[in-house]
Amino acid sequence: MFNTLLADFRIIFDRDPAARNWLEVLICYPGFQALVFHRIAHLLHSHKVPFIPRLISHIGRFLTGIEIHPGAVIGQSVFIDHGMGVVIGETAIIGNYCLIYQGVTLGGTGKETGKRHPTLGENVVVGGGAKILGNINIGSNVRIGASSVVLRDVPCDCTVVGIPGRIVYRSGAKVNPLEHGSLPDSEAQVIRALFDRINSLEEQVKLIKSLQSQLLELELEALVSKPHLQYSANNANYNLPDSIINDFLDPSKI
């Protein structure tokens, strides 16, 4: 357990540019403190010790704002940055080198028994406020955008954003955990596409109005050049009743 805690401690200096010295990290980083409480509680929980593991977890939650069930399995070099509001369920599994931000929930979706919480692979980045719910698998090198809600399995080397979470990027390249702010904005892309579609439809409407105006001018010219004809919009034929024609040609009407 000491080697695991040492790895958790060292990874903070790689992941957080604000980490300046070991004393500051040891005393002022709630994410690391929560992991210390959890490592102890998980060890007791794995040996079937009753009550005490949950009490330790509760004390850790009170001091750090991070709730980790003693049954959760967390790998080495995991960094919980800031961490306020993080909730990790009993059957959750977190791989090595994962980076978790504040407000993240690794929870269940109901009252299922057995494995009911997510499994995260290695080097996964979970943005602030994201919710990963249910017995699903998140592959290695996955980035999950802030405030996303993930309800389905995600393969390796993907980026997921939105509610519900959608895969917006696939790549075989290793994820840089500090580039979580460069995630694509899928909603902005959809809105931009809708604006483009609206502009296209407006151009079509303008073209149709222009053609209608030209057609009307042609009809007016035809009526002026042939005043004895009347245009029928229904059948597009020029016809007038005989009585009207006779009245028009009757000299007495002049």
Image (cartoon, rainbow, N blue to C red):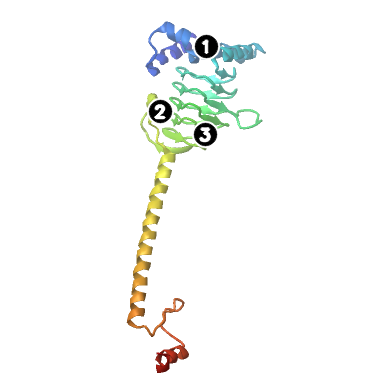
Q: Considering depth in this image, is 229 or 187 the residue closer to the camera?
A: 229
**Mark drawn on residue 36:** 1
- The location of residue 99, given as percent across then percent down, is 45, 22
Q: Which callout, 3 or 2, points at the residue further toward the start of the chain? A: 3
Question: In the rendered view, would you say 113 is above or below 253?
Answer: above
Q: Viewer-nearest of labels 2 and 1?
A: 2
Looking at the rendered structure, the secondary structure element under dot 2 is: helix
First in sequence: mark 3 vs mark 1? 1
User: Does residue 194 lie above or below 53 as drawn?
Assistant: below
Q: Residue at x 44, y 10 (%)?
A: 25
Q: Which residue is mark 3?
A: 150
**Residue occupying the point 43% across, 25% down:** 123
Tell me the crowding category of disc 3: few under 14, some 14 to 19, or many 20 or more residues within 10 angstroms, Cα based.
many
Q: Nearer the viewer, mark 3 or mark 2?
A: 2
Q: Identify the residue shown where x is 38% and y is 31%.
A: 182
Q: CA distance from mark 3 to mark 2?
A: 16 Å
The amino acid on which the numbered mark 3 sits, given as a three-letter code, is Val
Residue occupied by mark 2: 180
Image mark for residue 218: none
Q: Quadrant of the C terminus?
A: bottom left
**Left or right: where does residue 204 sit relative to residue 38?**
left
Tell which of 62 and 232 is nearer to you. 232
Q: Residue at x 35, y 67 (%)?
A: 211
Q: Is residue 194 left or right of residue 93?
A: left
Residue 18 spot, x, y in % from top left: 39, 15
